[in-house]
Amino acid sequence: MSNFFNDLLRLRRGAWEMVASILIALGVIMLMQPFVLTLFTYSFIVTLVGTVMFIIVSHFPE
């Protein structure tokens, strides 16, 4: 776990790609749930942020 946070602080690709992937998955889950309108409202923004973040961090060093 400590290694994960060290990679985040050192701007390593693997850790940041995992965060971006989690954001994308969270956005899709928020989009598909039928119970809370607020989650549905922000689902596109969360998915978009995760996608843009994934594109940016794919240029980080290994």
Image (spheres, rainbow, N blue to C red):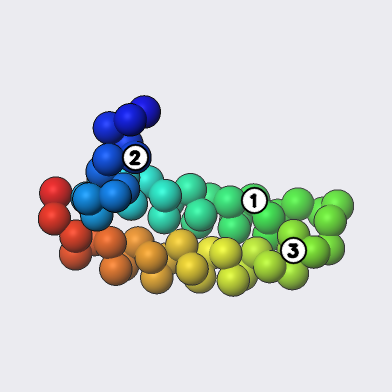
- Up-down relation of residue 1 to residue 48 (above or below): above
Residue on which the image places disc 3: 40
Judge from the rendering whether residue 57 lies leftward or rightward of residue 18; answer left or right: left
Residue on which the image places disc 1: 29
Question: Dot 3, crowdedness within 10 Å: few (<14), some or many (≥20)?
Answer: some
Marks 1, 2: nearer the viewer: 2
Q: Which mark is residue 5?
A: 2
Circle count: 3
Q: Secondary structure at mark 3?
A: helix
Judge from the rendering whether residue 47 lies leftward or rightward of residue 5; answer left or right: right
Task: Looking at the image, tell me whether mark 1 or mark 2 is earlier in sequence order.
Answer: 2
User: What residue is drawn where x is 54% and y is 64%?
Assistant: 47
Task: Looking at the image, tell me whether mark 2 or mark 3 is earlier in sequence order.
Answer: 2
User: What residue is drawn where x is 27% and y is 40%?
Assistant: 6
The amino acid pointed to by label 3 is Phe
Question: Dot 2, crowdedness within 10 Å: few (<14), some or many (≥20)?
Answer: few
Residue 4, x across and y down, in percent: 32, 36
